[in-house]
Image (cartoon, helix red, strand yellow):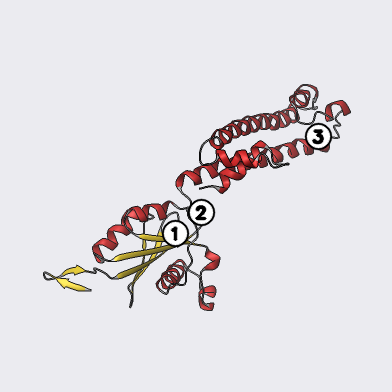
Amino acid sequence: MEQAQGTKLDFTGQQIYIGVDTGIKSWKVCIMTEQIEHKTFTQPPRVDVLAKYLHRNFPGAHYHCVYEAGYTGFWIHDELRASGIDCIVVNPADVPTKSKEHTHKTNGVDARKLCRNLRSGELDAIYVPARRSLEDRSLIRTRYGFVRKQTRCKNQIKALLAFYGISIPEDIVSSHWSRRYISWLEQEIVFKRPSGDQALKSLLEELVSLRQIIVHLTRQIRAVAHEEPYSTSVHHLMTVHGISTLSARQRRVNGVD
């Protein structure tokens, strides 16, 4: 560090390393220079707060930041870079950890560990997709989540019927979960108490709602898959035997940045 004009700080050309243990309510931040550990502190979960601290205390320096991939996603990475702070995201399992850090694990320890390994050059960054690609993938994952909810709802309906020994005629079973099948359940199954009827009705209403949401999401995925950079690759994937239209679109939207 050099001083110019009295007490004015100047870190021009120096490297500053920042390890961040991210959280919803706060971040634990560790800052190191090339020679010493400057400070470990807690701050609000905001990039602008960290950026202001660095520019105020280390003006002119080159800033290098790291945090672990997790539920916070990649928005921190994007905002740090937009603020002029070099940032990488790492896989938590790939971060070198000392035995003491395993047994005495705290947010501060994690932040210092990240910072130390960043300074020593022992971290490998993971690939950070573009925001557009992440949002398109979120659409795929959301649909998958609703499909799982639909399966659970169907199992609940089957379990309710089995619990009361209600059997389904063969000609109805053959149209399993079709509109005809659901209509039959709504109209023909009658319990001895209004409470039983309401239990089945609620499950059927949930099932119908889930199906409508899945149809809407499927249409959205198809629309996205017709856009570049997905459309050409989706067309090629659909020529492979066994890959359906939706599967091709899901695979390509999930795999392209």
Which residue in the structure is indicated by mark 1? 22
Alpha-carbon neighbours of circle 2 within 10 Å: few (<14), some, or many (≥20)? few
Q: Tell me how far mark 3 sits from mark 1, CA to CA.
A: 47 Å
Q: In the image, residue 126 lies at what x, y percent?
A: 50, 60
Q: What amino acid type should be assigned to the residue bearing mark 1?
A: Thr
Q: In the image, residue 249 lies at what x, y percent?
A: 61, 40
Q: What amino acid type should be assigned to the residue bearing mark 2?
A: Tyr
Which residue in the structure is indicated by mark 3? 161
Q: In the image, residue 218 lies at what x, y percent?
A: 61, 34
The circle on residue 71 is: 2
Alpha-carbon neighbours of circle 1 within 10 Å: few (<14), some, or many (≥20)? many
Position of 209 relative to 28 (above/below): above
The answer to which quarter of the image holds residue 194 is top right
Q: What residue do we see at 73% from left, 41% from top?
A: 241
Residue projecting furthest to the top: 187
The circle on residue 54 is: none
Position of 13 relative to 194 (above/below): below
Q: Tell me how far mark 2 sits from mark 1, CA to CA.
A: 9 Å
User: Which is in the foreground here, disc 3 or disc 1?
Assistant: 1
The answer to which quarter of the image holds residue 37 is bottom left
Q: In the image, 10: left or right of 140?
A: left
